[in-house]
Amino acid sequence: MSEVRYSIHAAVPQDAKAIADVHVAAWQDTYAGILPTRYLTRMSARHYTGQWHHRLCRTSSPGKTSQAVLVAKDEDGRVLGYGSSGPCRDDYFGGPGQLGAAEVHTLYVHPDYIDQGIGRALLTHVFRYLVEAKCDRAILWALADNPNHFFYRAMGGTLQAERNSHYWGRSLWEVGYVWPNLSMWVAAAQSVRSTSE
């Protein structure tokens, strides 16, 4: 596949259907053999479109809170991937909603566009957004069997937590990757970018 050109934008409610399409495709690809097949095959973009539309309608203005949904779009406006963040939902940083603590809720790229740098670009933009929102640390939870752990490590995350969660009648381990100093991470990423330009 030739390299695709894309840019990162704040998602709007009109992106809900496209985000849902990526959501379903990414889950069916990433979690095959990990989550129950009967669940994955029943996933519907139509179902998730409503959920994403609701979330996008209530997402705050950039820089105001840790709530963000970002999309990677190609030159034709197609959504190739998305990432979202919000308040930390567990007690890793001392309790849900701890000031300055955030969580990367989702980070998915459509299977047809893997290895194009889209995931890296999305996570970088999510971290920049969180720094603007005065968040200095973040956690990302991933299923222990998720094949993409190398990516989180390559992005500077350190494996610091684990928990047992229940998905669709199955007990599964999750691991938490932590970025303890987002300002430093963003500054280092900017330095690398400036050097390479």
Image: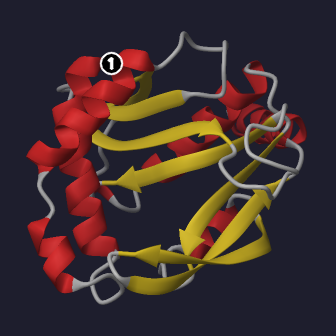
> What x and y, as percent, mark residue 113?
29, 55
**Near-viewer residue (85 or 82):** 85
Is disc 1 surrounded by few (<14), some (14 to 19) or many (20+) residues within 10 Å? some
In the orientation shown, which residue stands out farthest toward the bottom? Answer: 33
Which quarter of the rendered picture does the N terminus lie within? bottom left
Image location of residue 62, percent across then percent down? 58, 14
Q: Is 52 on the left-hand or right-hand side of 63? A: left
At a point 70% along the width and 30% down the height, the residue shown is 130
Q: Which residue is mark 1?
A: 12
**How many numbered discs sit on the rendered protein?**
1
Residue 104, image x, y percentages:
60, 47
What residue appears at the point 15 percent right and 62 percent down from the top-left corner? 43
For residue 103, above or below residue 132? below
In the orientation shown, which residue stands out farthest toward the front?
169
Mark 1: amino acid: Val
Where 25 falls versus 3 (above or below)?
below
> Residue drawn 71% across and 77% down?
162
